[in-house]
Amino acid sequence: MTAPVIGAALGTADLETYRDWILEKNRDLELQAFHAPEALDGDWGPEADHTRKLLDGYTGRLGIHGPFWGFSISSPDPEIRKVIAKRMDQGLDICAAVGATQMVIHSPYTTWDYNNLDDKPGARERVIECSHGSIGAAVKRAEDQGVVLVLETIQDIDPQDRRVLADSFDSEALRLSIDTGHVHYACGSTGAPPVDYFVRAAGDWLHHVHLQDADGYADRHWAIGEGTILWPSVFRALGEIEASPRLILELRDKAGIPASMRYLEGLGLGQ
């Protein structure tokens, strides 16, 4: 079986550095230059134009990391949900400007939720209701725009929660994402199952994976091979599902991309 082609999450300066590597195999690319509040509210047009020029000739799968700072999509405050809806619209505006077909957003499920949602009647349904209030319009717009929103694991302990939430929208424009380091943190620190369990639970709903290594204690974003994630088990699980998720190196230090690739190539897991 041919090893999957690995891509990366990059800011604009990093894209300039790794442009040739991305274009050589039209690797999956996630732009991480437009999600901060100051970027969303600023004049991002020139940077979007520059990005498009850098990607001249690129035919791979392009996405962005969407807005997430300072909010949960399941906020019970209707005024906050209006702000979230605005941020989602801004993210989709950027998708349109750069030609992105995927936008990463964050799961609302917390460690507290895992232990408390079933203690209060209707609490699980309330998370879903409030999430619809925040991103329902964005999901409909994404359908029309040809964009898929992907719910990334953050504090998730139960791998099924995000799938139930996504399914409630009854839309192909909302699917699932896994961040390997987030799951490994939750596995080591809060009792979640390991990464391969999350992959299998997501199944064909899995459209995106952040690849980063960690130690099970914190959200490290280390180069692949520096932490304790059991990578053969992760890629074995990925090979068992029908979906072809975007596989994105999301490293704190982008200089670790070559070493990460050497590690994965050495194990025959990626190229």
Image (cartoon, helix red, strand yellow):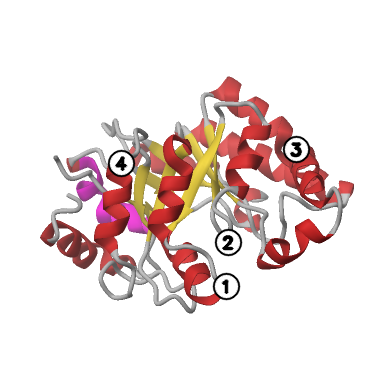
Q: Residue at x 77, y 64 (%)?
A: 116
Q: Residue at x 47, y 46 (%)?
A: 201
Q: N-terminal of the two: label 3 or label 1?
A: 3
Which residue is tagged 2? 157
Residue 166's x, y, as percent?
62, 38
Q: N-terminal of the two: label 2 or label 3?
A: 3
Residue 81's x, y, as percent?
80, 46
Q: Does 196 appear above or below 55?
A: below
Which residue is tagged 3? 132
Q: Are marks 1 and 2 in contact (CB under 8 Å)?
A: yes
Q: Are marks 4 and 3 in contact (CB under 8 Å)?
A: no
Q: N-terminal of the two: label 1 or label 2?
A: 2
- In 3D space, how far apart are the residues under numbered discs 1 and 4 (Cα atoms)? 27 Å
Which residue is tagged 4? 240
Q: Is residue 124 left or right of residue 205?
A: right
Q: Is residue 146 magenta?
A: no
Q: Is residue 21 magenta?
A: yes
Task: Report helix, strand or loop for mark 4.
Answer: helix
Residue 235's x, y, as percent?
28, 52
Q: N-terminal of the two: label 1 or label 4?
A: 1
Magenta stretch?
Answer: 10-23
Q: Nearer the viewer, mark 3 or mark 1?
A: 1
Kindly identify the amino acid type of the residue bearing the numbered disc 1: Thr
The numbered disc on residue 190 is 1
Task: Report helix, strand or loop for mark 2.
Answer: loop
Kindly identify the amino acid type of the residue bearing the numbered disc 4: Glu
Task: Report helix, strand or loop for mark 1.
Answer: loop
Q: N-terminal of the two: label 4 or label 2?
A: 2
- In 3D space, how far apart are the residues under numbered discs 2 and 3 (Cα atoms)? 21 Å
